[in-house]
Image: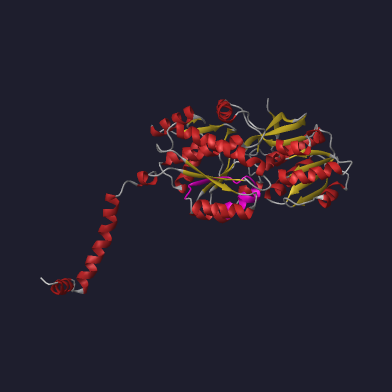
Amino acid sequence: MSMRSFRRESTMAWRLPSSMKRAAVALLILIVPLLTTLLAPSARAQDAAGPLRIAVLFPFTGDLSDFGQPFLQAAELAVNDINAAGGVHGQPMELVQGDSATSPQQAVEEARRLIELEGVSAIVGPAGSGETLPVAESVTGPAGVLEITMSATSPALTIANDNDFLFRTTISDAAQGIVMADLAQEQGFASACVLYVNNAYGQGLSDAFSERFTAEGGTITAQVPHEQEQASYASEIASCTEGDPDVLIAAAYPESGRVFLRELAESGDAPSVIFSDGLKSPEMFADLGWQVFEGDYGTAAGLFKSEATAVFDKGWEDAYGEIPEVPYLREINDAIYLIALAAEKAGSNDSTAIRDALRDVANEPGTVVGPGQAGWQAAVKAIAAGEDVNYEGAAGSVDLDENGDVSKGAILIWQIKGEAIEDTDQRSVDLTAEEAAATPVS
C-alpha cells in the first residue's frame, strides 16, 4: 500500500457520523481518568514520593542578624536528628535557607522564591512580627503553604488573614507585656517611656506593656516609635526621656539597639532600662560594654524544663558546644519536629495535608513524644501503629489553639551581671484565663 493510499484510508476511517463521534469522545472522557487512577500509585504514596523539603527564613543580615547563625544551628540540629533516626517517610529531610534580612520586603520576596522555585512544603520563620505578618497575608496564606514562626510575638498575628496557615511555637507579647509591666512595678518604677521599633512587634509589645502598667497604677510618659537601622536616634531618645521617666522600655532589635543604647548611655542622666526579647544579644552588650547596663533587666520567652529540654540541651552541646544566651532556639527545634510529625501522620508532603495534621500531633490526646533521635523513632512507630501522638517540646507544651497560637507559656526575666546575661526568674502566663496573670515558676 502506498503512503498516499494509507493516508486516504485512514482519513476515511474517521469519517463517522457526528453522533458516533460524540459517543466516542464521551467514552474517552470517562475511561482516561479511570485508567490514570488505576495505573498511578496511590495518592498517599505519590505525595510522599520525594523528600520533605522545609525552608528556614531567618535574619542572616539586617537588624536581627545577631540571631541568624544560632537559629540555623537549632534547625539543623532537629533535621540531623530526624534524618539520623530514619527521616520522614523513610527519606532524609531537606533544609533550604532563605534570608529575611529583617525586612518585610525581602522576607516576602524570599518566601515566594522558597515556595515557587524551591518547592518547599513549609517555612519556619521569619523571626520578626514585622516580616511574619506580610509573609503570611501575601504569600503563604494565599499559596496554602504552612508557616511556623518561632519568635514573632505580636498579638496582631492572632487575627492575621492567613487562611489558617500561620502558626507559632511561642506565646504572644500579650504575655511578655504583662511580665515587663509587673517587673517594672516590682523594681519600684512609677513612670515609664517606651521606645519601640515601628512594626507589628514593637507596637504590639508597647501597647501590651502600657495597658498593664497603667492598670497597675503606673504612668506612661511617652510611647515613641523608631525606624530600623538609623544612623542616630537622638531625637527619639529626647522625645522618650523628656518626661523624666523612671525606666525606659526598649522594644527593639540588636543592630538598632547598638546605636540608640550607646546614645542613651552617652546622653548623661539616663533612666534605667528594661530590654525586650529582641535585645537579648550577648554580642550587642559586648560591643556596648557590659558594665554600661550592669544590673538592668530584660524579658524573653521562657521554657518549662522537661526531659525534652534536656534532650535538646545535650544534643546542642554534643553538636556545637555551649548553648548561647540567644532566645527561641528551642522553639525553632520544636517547629521542625511539629512539621515533620504532621507530614509523617498525613503520609504526605502536601502542605495542606501537613497543616491539617498539625494540631493532631501538637495537642492532646495521644502518646507523648519528644525531640531527639529516640523521640523521633518512638513517634514514627506510634504513628505507624495508628496511634495519636502528642508532641511535648524542648521549650514546653506547644498545644495550638484555633488561631495557631500557644496560649499558655512562660516568660523569662534576665539581668546583666558582670560580663554575662543571667536568667533570674520565670513567670507562667495563661492567656486563656479571664484575667491573665503571671505566676512565678519554681
Question: Is there any visible trace of residue 280 in the rendered image?
Answer: no
Residue 132 coordinates in the image, percent (x, y): 61, 49
Residue 357 coordinates in the image, percent (x, y): 47, 42
Q: Up-down: is 249 above or below 386?
A: below
Looking at the image, the residue that sits furthest to the left is 1
* Total numbered labels: 0
Decide which of 92, 225 is in the foreground and name it: 92
Say whether residue 146 is left or right of residue 218.
left
Residue appearing at x 69%, y 47% in the figure: 63
The quarter of the picture where the C terminus appears is top right
Decide which of 365, 310 is in the foreground and name it: 310
Residue appearing at x 82%, y 36% in the figure: 292
The quarter of the picture where the N terminus appears is bottom left
Highlighted range, magenta: 119-137
- Residue 4 on the magenta span: no
Residue 370 coordinates in the image, percent (x, y): 51, 30
Q: Up-down: is 202 above or below 329?
A: below
